[in-house]
Image (cartoon, rainbow, N blue to C red):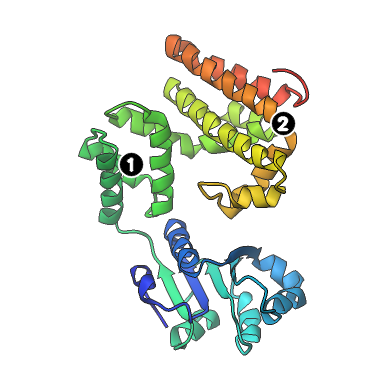
């Protein structure tokens, strides 16, 4: 059964297996979020490789249930045509859980694609690149909602850099949101600088590596990237956002929650692919040290505003200090 992404709300979750294929990762994420919202089950994520290595364990998970088990939403990520044999094996059994199969582009001759397209029971949702006008609308709505003045030329530049994927666009809009703070306008030059940052390493990757104390990767990013004054302020804001997230999770852990539960219940939700780096960050920091980091960030932000020409130097000094400090020592 073929449906379009906007028709998902009309589909009963009695259709327990969903195949989402294509190259639009941002749209895929929105579809998965809508399925999770409708079904409200416990989320479990697998990679195809994990399942092929332990096929028996996976099929037992699908087949065996008790009246006291929570319903599950099982997402199989980064799938290829190889997953078809596994799916064909389990579809003959009664499935109480929702299964989401996430693949890249599938050719018309694909066995998996053909099976789902002809099925009256299961759902296939193609995700093609977003149309240019759809992305323009998403960008316009963002700036209108935040009451930010921006020219059409600047919006065009922003959209043109997103490769037809709303996921990339929303990442860029989030980056802009961190950057503008109390600003009421943003220029073409600022958009060019902010989006150009993603052509080398993203600000998020730099911050994540630093907070995970991955000194080799952090130094590599710093050496290979040419940051501007505007970049420095943006990166600092992301440091603040992610440090507060670590602080919140550590607070829950200190109050008796386990790591997985604290991460799973964090608001806003943490995407599955970000969980390994967050676990690493939690392991290398203590609650009081992250508090000191946040205090240091706030002080550094004031210094950068007063000494804008030194912003990149001050930021790099701060990052080197972070990756070299030991968690059990004072900042």
- Mark 1 crowd level (few <14, some 14–19, many ≥20, 10 Å Cα): many
Q: Looking at the rendering, which quadrant does residue 250 occupy? A: top right
Q: Percent x, y for residue 288?
A: 69, 26
- Mark 2 crowd level (few <14, some 14–19, many ≥20, 10 Å Cα): some
Q: Residue at x 55, y 21 (%)?
A: 297
Seen from the viewer's position, the closer of residues 313 and 322 is: 322
Is residue 282 visible in the rendered structure shown here? yes
Q: Residue at x 66, y 21 (%)?
A: 320
| Residue bearing mark 2 | 286
Q: Earlier in the sequence, mark 2 or mark 1?
A: 1
Q: Answer with left or right where residue 139 lies relative to residue 64.
A: left
Q: Answer with left or right where residue 32 lies relative to residue 280.
A: left
Compared to residue 301, the image places residue 191 above or below, namely: below
Seen from the viewer's position, the closer of residues 262 and 304 is: 262
The quarter of the picture where the N terminus appears is: bottom left
Secondary structure of the residue carrying tag 1 is: helix
Compared to residue 2, the image places residue 23 above or below, namely: above
Seen from the viewer's position, the closer of residues 100 and 108 is: 100
Q: Percent x, y for residue 244?
A: 57, 33
Compared to residue 210, the image places residue 26 above or below, namely: below
Q: Answer with left or right where residue 323 lies relative to residue 121.
A: right
Secondary structure of the residue carrying tag 2 is: loop
Is residue 195 visible in the rendered structure shown here? no
| C-alpha distance separating marks 2 and 1 | 39 Å
| Residue bearing mark 1 | 158
Seen from the viewer's position, the closer of residues 114 and 75 is: 75
């Amino acid at each position: 059964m073929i449906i379009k992404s906007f028709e998902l709300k009309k589909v009963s979750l009695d259709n327990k297996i969903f195949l989402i294929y294509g190259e639009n990762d941002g749209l895929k994420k929105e579809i998965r979020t809508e399925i999770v919202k409708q079904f409200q089950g416990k989320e479990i994520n697998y990679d195809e490789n994990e399942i092929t290595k332990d096929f028996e364990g996976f099929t037992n998970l699908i087949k065996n249930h008790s009246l006291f088990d929570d319903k599950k939403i099982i997402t199989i990520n980064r799938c290829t045509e190889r997953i078809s044999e596994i799916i064909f094996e389990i579809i003959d059994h009664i499935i109480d859980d929702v299964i989401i199969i996430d693949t890249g582009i599938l050719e018309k001759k694909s066995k998996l694609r053909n099976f789902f397209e002809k099925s009256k029971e299961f759902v296939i949702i193609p995700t093609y690149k977003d149309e240019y006008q759809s992305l323009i609308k998403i960008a316009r709505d963002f700036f209108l909602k935040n009451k930010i003045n921006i020219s059409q030329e600047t919006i065009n530049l922003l959209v043109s850099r997103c490769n037809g994927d709303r996921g990339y666009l929303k990442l860029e809009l989030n980056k802009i949101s961190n950057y503008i703070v109390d600003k009421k306008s943003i220029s073409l030059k600022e958009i060019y600088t902010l989006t150009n940052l993603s052509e080398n390493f993203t600000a998020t990757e730099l911050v994540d590596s630093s907070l995970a104390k991955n000194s080799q990767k952090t130094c590599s990013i710093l050496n290979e990237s040419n940051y501007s004054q505007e970049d420095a302020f943006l990166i600092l804001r992301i440091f603040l956002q992610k440090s507060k997230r670590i602080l919140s999770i550590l607070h829950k852990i200190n109050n008796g929650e386990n790591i997985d539960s604290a991460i799973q219940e964090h608001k806003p939700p943490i995407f599955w692919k970000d969980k390994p780096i967050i676990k690493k960050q939690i392991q290398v920091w203590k609650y009081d040290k992250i508090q000191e980091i946040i205090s240091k960030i706030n002080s550094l932000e004031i210094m950068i505003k007063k000494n804008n020409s030194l912003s990149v130097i001050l930021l790099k000094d701060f990052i080197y200090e972070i990756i070299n400090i030991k968690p059990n020592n004072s900042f």
